[in-house]
Image (cartoon, rainbow, N blue to C red):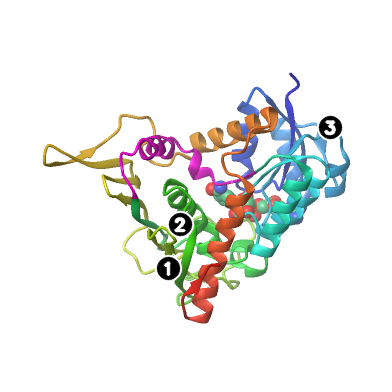
Amino acid sequence: MEPLRVCIIGTGSISDMHFKSFANNPDATLYGVFDYSAERAEAKAEQYGISHVYRHIEEVYSDPNVDAVSICTWNNSHAEISVGALNAGKHVLVEKPLAMNVEEALKVEAAVRNSGKTLQVGFVRRFATNTKVLKSFVDNGALGDIYYAKASCLRRLGNPGGWFADKDRSGGGPLIDLGVHVIDVCWYLMGRPKVKSISGNVYSKLGNRGNVENLNFYKAADYHKDRNTVEDLANALITFENGASLLVDVSYTLHAKQDEIGVKLYGTKGGAELEPELAIVSEENNTILNIHPQIDHLSFDFANAFQNQIDSFVSSCITGTNPAAPVEDGVEMMKILAGIYEAADKKCEVTFA
Ligand SMILES: NC(=O)c1ccc[n+]([C@@H]2O[C@H](COP(=O)([O-])OP(=O)(O)OC[C@H]3O[C@@H](n4cnc5c(N)ncnc54)[C@H](O)[C@@H]3O)[C@@H](O)[C@H]2O)c1
């Protein structure tokens, strides 16, 4: 069997996780790279021993030796490149979010249907070991019916700046960047229920706090402390047709004592904390039990989750099986994110048809 020949598009910060994970997969070969910045693309090609550096996206599409692309560009090009690659007969792994808005996301979905190619959305938290273990408990009925979930990802100081802070290129701030991950993993574990209504708020109160000293945080390569057009906090209540609800809050900055990540689910038979550390709560012999699984990664482990995500994508491309994070889930997540922004903008609950 010939290995899947992959071209990485966008060679910035997250691309290293893609390069390393494809390099570790025996059924894939790193074949090409493309970035607006030829210098950055060439540096990655040299680092990972990749033979082809493309000068234009059209060269990627027209090269019959490229079987699949991994899209690690700014959010504003995810949909366009996905559609271009699918129409050229390539499989696609696209970083989250699938698109900037619902209209774009639906165009990608149509291109997947028309091309018959595999497209997987970068919902990497689905592939983390702690998520996979919890999913097996949920599927076995350990939690019963999940009727409430809480998703939180709060940074006290962590607006990465650059394109992340530019709404025209990112589509938004912590909601579309961090919220997408924690909302998706809750929704996935809840059994992907249909949304009934959403209420939400976004706040732009603190800016990017470029004035703060003596506290480091991740910055985009083109960070500039004067530039910021995205929200710094978002919260939402999502209610589903089955009566379940999901409460979310995410921030790039907040006067919080410390950063916080929490993903928690509550059901009729048991509960679970996925983050900050996997634990399952149950009741037996009239006694409440906290169960702590003995596994390697009780919390989200970046390298492990990325490897699982890319192994799963490669396998779907080769075998033709449905990807574990399919385009329709990317579309649904886009509807939820857009719904939260809309509810916040209109200052009222929005309902889904
Ligand atoms: N899954 C995760 O946990 C995770 C983590 C970080 C970032 N991301 C996602 O990965 C993507 C990239 O983020 P990043 O942190 O690597 O950003 P980055 O700014 O470090 O890198 C982006 C790169 O893409 C290039 N680029 C942008 N648009 C392009 C286009 N149309 N054609 C060619 N090159 C283009 C830029 O020149 C840059 O080199 C984003 O969509 C982000 O949401 C995902």
Mark 3 lies within 8 Å of ligand 1 (Cβ measured): no
Residue 159: percent from left, percent from top: 51, 63
Residue 339: percent from left, percent from top: 54, 68
Q: Which residues are magenta?
A: 120-145
Q: At 78% across and 44% down in the image, what residue appears?
A: 115
From this viewpoint, is residue 235 visible? yes
From this viewpoint, is residue 101 visible? no
Per the image, the residue denoted by label 2 is 216
Q: At 26% across and 45% down in the image, what residue appears?
A: 269
- Quarter holding residue 321: top right
Residue 182: percent from left, percent from top: 45, 53
Q: Dot 2 lies on which element?
A: loop
Q: Dot 3 lies on which element?
A: loop
User: Disc number at residue 235?
Assistant: 1
Q: Residue furthest left?
A: 286
Along the polypeptide, which appears first: circle 3 or circle 2?
3
Could you classify mark 2 by the number of other residues whose Cα lies within 10 Å: few (under 14), some (14-19), or many (20 or more)?
few
